[in-house]
Image (cartoon, rainbow, N blue to C red):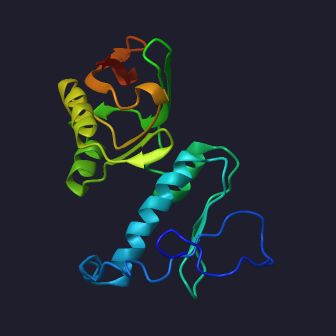
Amino acid sequence: MSDGHITGDIRSSAGLKGTVVTAEELFYNTPCRRRALKYPADEMNRIADVVIRYAIHNPTVSFTMRRCGSGNDFRTTGDGDQFKVIASLHGSNAAKNLISLDRDHQKLFYSLKGCMARPSASCTAPSLQSKQNRQKIFYLFINNRSVECAQLKQALDVVFAAQNTFSTFIMLSLQVGCAYRHRIILLSFTLFRSSENEADLCPFVIYTLYS
């Protein structure tokens, strides 16, 4: 593929069932962007970040990533266990005390799925250590595409700060009706208690507004 077009002939090839993505000569037409990545490790880390996001979002698909001339950097099983994928890619600490999120609002034409690390008090030693090391992970998918949304991330931070809590890992997957995907305005977030226990605070996207 070059500039979105097939450059060679399509031919049969022996291999395992699935999709193999090989990246070569990245940024060939944008040398200034290529120069911004001074070391191959920087390029590798950015590619790995994208693959990891989609591996977590698609736990039923087995992902394998390897560098040229080396063994597997990581591999997921594809057995559908999202928590297991998170543990294998981010370590057991990131997968501790994960909470599943599931919200469906037919009137507002969106559904939310995902997971997060159970919020802990901001003053605890693990939370302070995570803040010091900047070990906070936030993944967001909208209609199965990985996106960055600083406003949404900041809104979550405000909600947690109001409750003096901290979560080290959040992964959200929003499905928005196609007819309304360009008309959603985020208003706010809220926390509700699933019990009287302070540790059972769970965040959900509650309010949206359509123009």
Residue 71: percent from the left, percent from the top?
61, 80
Give 112 or 170, whichever is nearer the viewer: 112
Residue 35: percent from the left, percent from the top?
26, 83
Query: Relative to 37, is 178 on the left or the right?
Result: right
**On-image quarter of the C terminus:** top left
Task: State the residue lying farthest toward the bottom.
Answer: 69
Residue 62: percent from the left, percent from the top?
66, 57
136 in relation to 112, above or below: below
96 in relation to 69, above or below: above
Give 72 or 168, whichever is nearer the viewer: 72
Give 8 or 121, whichever is nearer the viewer: 8
Q: Residue at position x 34%, y 44% from top?
A: 168
**On-image quarter of the N terminus:** bottom right
84 in relation to 62, above or below: above
Name the quadrant containing residue 198: top left
Q: Residue at position x 50%, y 76% from top?
A: 2
Q: Residue at position x 58%, y 44% from top?
A: 82
Give 163 or 81, whichever is nearer the viewer: 81
Residue 136: percent from the left, percent from the top?
31, 48
Q: Residue at position x 27%, y 32% from top?
A: 156
Query: So how many labels did they put on this image?
Result: 0
Name the quadrant containing residue 161: top left
